[in-house]
Image: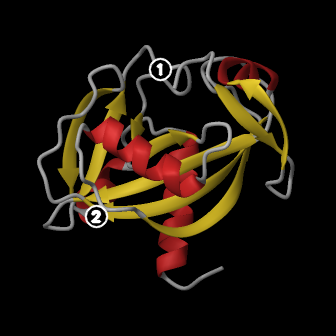
Amino acid sequence: MSAEEIIDVVDEEDRVTGQSPRGEAYRLGLRHRCAFVLVTDPEGRIFVHRRTPTKQVFPSRYDMFVGGVVGAGESYDEAALREAGEELGVTGLPQPTGLFKFLYESESGTGSGSGRHSWWSYVYEVRCEVPVRPQVEEIDWYAFLTEQELAQRLGEWDWVPDGAAAYDRLREFREGRP
């Protein structure tokens, strides 16, 4: 999505209250929607990547999710499948399985401004059975890492904060904690 594309602005209950160009929503800290997709390969390894330095939000940081902003009028499910296919460079990906939704809030800057940032974040998972060809405009580097390899790098690499928060919540979700 470009900075000019229109996204839904939502309230604290995830109800649509208006629309805004994506770049303006980031600049003004307007609450919106995002889809996060944890992708595994047939061996169960997790797709991890480093974002390009040209990304509007969290440039040059690592992420264990693909995904992005939900477009105006688009469902979380539609955005999860669209974003995963685009970022991985694959077609025919199965519909990601929705796991849970949470409100991400941060007082820190996103790389495109500072202040309060907030978005409803729906976490998904999907298994990718075909070779990936990630978008060079989105992804500088990638690898499939085991859970153990990923855990080792959590304290070493500079991660996107919303992805790190989603991953923490995913681990809690899998352990049966609220």
- Which of 79 and 73 lies nearest the eye of the viewer? 73
Q: Is residue 174 above or below residue 108?
A: below
Q: Can residue 65 be seen in this view?
A: no
Color theme of the render: secondary structure
User: Which residue was labeled with disc 2?
Assistant: 147
Residue 103 figure quarter:
bottom right
Instruction: Residue 178 in the image: state x and y as whole percent.
Output: 66, 79
Location of residue 33 with respect to 28 vertically, above or below: below
Q: Is residue 74 left or right of residue 19?
A: left
Q: Is residue 149 above or below residue 51?
A: below
Q: Which amino acid does label 1 sit on?
A: Lys
Crowding around mark 2 (Cα neighbors within 10 Å: few <14, some 14 to 19, many 20+) is few
Give the distance between the C-alpha atoms of the residues marked 2 and 1, in whole angstroms. 26 Å
Q: Can residue 156 be seen in this view?
A: yes
The kind of secondary structure element at disc 1 is loop
Which residue in the structure is indicated by mark 1?
55
Residue at 15% x, 60% y is 129
* Left or right of 105 in this view: 44: left
Q: Indicate the position of residue 13 as horizontal and vertical percent values.
A: 85, 58
**Left or right, 68 with reference to 10:** left
- Which amino acid, by three-letter code, is at mark 2? Glu
Where in the figure is residue 143, as x and y percent of width and height? 19, 43
- Tell me which label, 2 or 1, sits earlier in the chain: 1
Please, which residue is most extreme toward the front here?
73
Hey, which residue is sitting farthest bottom in the picture? Answer: 176
Q: Quadrant of residue 57?
A: top right
Count residues near mark 1 (Cα–Cα under 10 Å), then give few for <14, some for 14-19, many for 20+.
some
Q: Residue at x 46, y 44 (%)?
A: 67
- Picture coordinates of residue 175 (x, y %)? 49, 82
Q: Nearer the viewer, residue 11 or 73?
A: 73
Residue at (68% x, 33% y) in the render: 7
Q: Is mark 2 on a helix, strand or loop?
A: helix
